Image: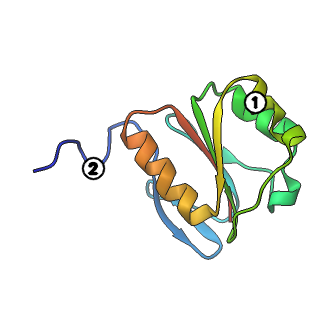
Amino acid sequence: MKFQPDRLDGVNAVSRLETGRIWVLLQPFEHGVVVPWQGAVSDWPARQAEDIQADHLQALVALQPELVILGTGARQRFLSASVLRPLIEARIGYELMDTAAACRTYNVLVNEGRRAVGAFIL
């Protein structure tokens, strides 16, 4: 017996991840994306983890999430505290993981009704 729906209506979900392509719902993207729990998917300017800047994360703060899930590509990468400062100062939880794990985690969170934003590098 299921206790919750497979997908909540009106919530963005990552439906597939392939080499060089991510699918949000039924729409493919061939570049990194920011996927808020609701609303429009947008371009993520970082093409690799080393490109992520504090101002990129400040743009995510403006979405007012409770959590940010950062997919750093094929391998998990870590960011310095100075880059993460906008999230820390706004008291927004965050996790960094490889993009495949980040997509799975993001989907679980939004299907639980959490206000999560995923920022995924391919």
Q: Secondary structure at mark 1?
A: helix
- Number of marks in picture: 2
Query: Could you tell me residue 33's position as x and y percent?
Result: 66, 52
Tag 2's secondary structure?
Answer: loop
* In the image: residue 45, left or right of residue 20: right
Side (left or right) of 4 relative to 75: left
Which residue is located at x 66 percent, y 65 percent?
Answer: 30
Q: Residues within 10 Å of mark 2 (few under 14, many from 20)?
A: few
Please give left or right for residue 19 compared with residue 24 in the image.
right
Amino acid type indicated by mark 1: Ile
Name the mark on residue 88. Answer: 1
| Earlier residue among tags 2 and 1 | 2
The answer to whether residue 120 of the structure is visible from this angle is: no
**Mark 2, residue position:** 6
- Reply above or below: 101 against 93: below
Callout 2 amino acid = Asp
Q: Is residue 84 left or right of residue 35?
A: right
Spatial distance from mark 2 to mark 1, Cα to Cα?
A: 32 Å
> Within 10 Å of the Cα at label 1, are there few (<14), some (14-19), or many (20+) other Cα atoms?
some
Image coordinates for residue 121, horizontal then vertical, percent: 70, 60
Q: Position of residue 58 (x, y in %)?
A: 79, 31
Res 72 label: none
Corner quadrant of residue 42: top right
The residue located at (64%, 63%) in the rendering is 98
Find residue 64 and report its horizontal and vertical position in percent. 62, 24
